[in-house]
Amino acid sequence: MSSNSVDTIFEIILNRRSIRSFTDREIPESALMKILEAGWQAPSAGNRQPVEFILIKDPSIKQKISAQEFVEEAAAVIVVIVNLERTTSRYGDRGEKMYIYHDSGAAVQNMLLMCKALGLGSCWIGAFNDERVSKLLELPEHVLPMAIIPIGYPNEDPEPPRKIPLDKIVHKDRYEETKIKEYLMSLVD
């Protein structure tokens, strides 16, 4: 991989933001497929591939899927779902309690980064009514909604969020609680 590729990837990571305001411009189908392909290419525990996607463009479904208005305004919404049977058949409780979150999180992050690379905005929503979404999308009991991702052309350019300095959260050889505590206490003063 060339240094230009590394720089480009890192720039996309650094500049990705949660976008909650979109223009009314439509997204080309080829761009949506690239985003879905990025999610599909994410790693999964034991290559069980429990992650699936529901692409929503229907305005009435977008309106019902979330109580957040910007979801309805998005040109498209992807609901990331997991099929429990694919992971629990090999990993049992560990698959259900841990790996589905790892697998779906990797897929979501890939899609968010692809959105940014394509000049699109997106937002990772984890706070939603699981039961309502499952019913609306007619999910069987062994399929769970994990995330909602509204996607569109951004109508805002948010400032970067404040981050805890890297040297405060990277520990060497063992956990060093005092350095993060000292930093957090300095914010209170």
Image (cartoon, helix red, strand yellow):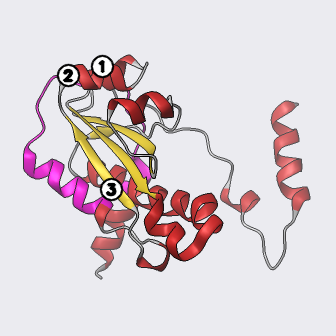
Give the residue at mark 1: 63
Point out the image quarter for the N terminus: bottom left
| Numbered range of the magenta stretch | 12-39
- Indicate the secondary structure of the residue bearing disc 1: helix
Q: What residue is shown at x 81% (from left), y 36% (from top)?
A: 187
Residue 162, quarter of picture: top right
Give percent across and percent down for residue 106.
Answer: 45, 61
The disc placed on residue 59 is: 2
153 left or right, relative to 112: left
- How many C-alpha atoms fall within 10 Å of the one at disc 3: few (<14), some, or many (≥20)? some
Give the residue at mark 3: 52
Q: What residue is shown at x 53% (from left), y 32% (from top)?
A: 127
Query: Which one is in front, 149 or 172?
Result: 149
Three-letter amino acid code at the position of disc 3? Glu
- Determine contact: label 2, label 1, CB under 8 Å: yes
Residue 123, quarter of picture: top left
